[in-house]
Image: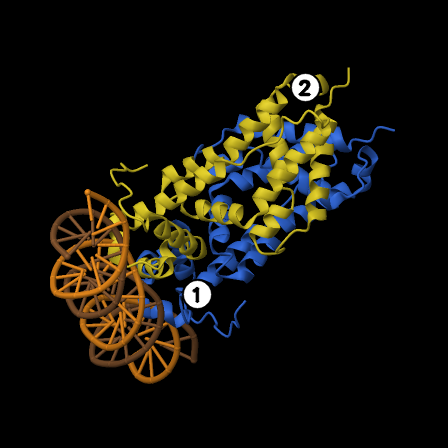
Chain colours: A blue, B yellow, C brown, D orange
Amino acid sequence: MFAEAQVKKGRKFDQVIDGARTVFMREGYEGASVDEIARDAGVSKATLYSYFPDKQHLFLAVLQSECAQQAEVEFLMGTRELSVEETLHVVCKTLMTFILSRFGQDMFRLCVAEAQRFPELGRTFYDSGPQKWGRKIVQFLDSPRAREVLSIEDTGLAADQLAQLCRTDLMLKVLFGIEKDPSEEEIDRVAAEAVKTFLARYRRTA
Amino acid sequence: MFAEAQVKKGRKFDQVIDGARTVFMREGYEGASVDEIARDAGVSKATLYSYFPDKQHLFLAVLQSECAQQAEVEFLMGTRELSVEETLHVVCKTLMTFILSRFGQDMFRLCVAEAQRFPELGRTFYDSGPQKWGRKIVQFLDSPRAREVLSIEDTGLAADQLAQLCRTDLMLKVLFGIEKDPSEEEIDRVAAEAVKTFLARYRRTA
DNA sequence: GACAATGTAAACCAATCCGTTCAGTTTCGG
DNA sequence: CCGAAACTGAACGGATTGGTTTACATTGTC
């Protein structure tokens, strides 16, 4: 993103990142003041500026660390115990739970807001979020076990459709504050409907 | 939203709104300065403040006017010339074209970013955007003409699924700057695939 | 052509912003 | 226990912020 000649020199590095994440997520980039970040991090402003040359670099460091975290979500698609249909259901629920989580929502909000000002941020987020999930799903759809049951010409598009079906209704509602915390049942229902629609299209018939 | 005792007194009202829209869309709420807005609007700051008591009210006035505009998108679903399938395709293309337009993207970005700071904004946007489209689609799905061909238990959810399928891939890509201007063909393809998946699930069989 | 409404340009305010500086304190390895 | 590295707290500078005010210009109407 920028050249990162900056190295972690001291013991309060994590405090700074943590405080910055908190404040940036709450206030956005422009809304967050460096003084507030330093205060929240329990660190002097001089210390903060010894780690990062300026506000932008701090911001990008935070977001990149978060994106990395985002990418580490693990999948349990290998489980042979479950049928393909059940596996899809689990995948949908996992994805939805992540998308609707506080963390997922905050990340999405902040990256959408600032992708203009920091173009490379948009790419980073997309790659470590939606793209990563897409690949994982494709990987499953392409597996022999899935191919046995499914008939898909374009697995990339199918995966995107499935992910998109997982965002039905609830995502926008949470994003715009219409609904606060979707219940387990709501998530389960939307996931089930997503799988149903997906299978209606892609289940092997012949 | 706020009490709107403010009345349009003068001839430069529209200039102010236009300038404010431009700058807010480009810079976000915190990033936009009132001086910049006045400059861009070709209006003195005193004039601006004679229309709006403060920056917040100006911001909300802009967004509400935009939401109203958003709501006025008209549908051509009445066209009896087209089959249900063709109608769905047109609906998807219309929705996608709007979602992927500069205007649609800017609105979405700004409202996502500020829905936290201005809770009622989130509601307003959702109502005049996604909600409105949802209702229109439901209205069509419930029409006798559509019912003849489709078999849907929950038309609300089905409508949301269709809308969600329209966002497949392209929306996130545009939102995060991975793709700039989706071609007509790309849109057409995603729309066609959306309809295909939708019909696979909801086309009447018996 | 006069009168009131509307708009302008600029100075002005207090507050806040980012980023720097510095004298002094804490921490910690050897 | 010493010396260097890390950290602090507070002050500072220059710029910018949202918002007000003032003295003057333009507009449209009767």
Residue on which the image places disc 1: A56
Residue B51 visible? The answer is: yes
Residue flagged by tag 1: what amino acid is it? Gln
Tell me the SS state at disc 2. helix
Instruction: Find residue C16 and report its image quarter.
Output: bottom left
A78 up-or-down from A186: above or below: below
Check the residue under mark 1 and report the chain it is in: A
> Do circles 2 and 1 both sit on a common chain?
no
Q: Which residue is mark 2?
A: B145
Q: Give the CA separation, mark 2 to mark 1.
A: 56 Å
Chain letter of mark 2 equals B
Farthest residue in the right direction?
A206
Q: Tag 2: Cα neighbours inside 10 Å, few (<14), some, or many (≥20)?
A: few
Look at 79% across and 39% down and name the residue there.
A152
Q: Is residue A161 above or below residue B142?
A: below
- Count the numbered circles shown: 2
| Residue type at tag 2 | Arg
Image height of D19 relative to B190, above or below: below
> Image check: A106 left or right of B16?
right
Q: Quadrant of the C terminus of chain A?
A: top right
In x, y percent, where is residue C2?
Answer: 12, 54
> In which quadrant of the rendered view does residue A59 lie?
bottom left
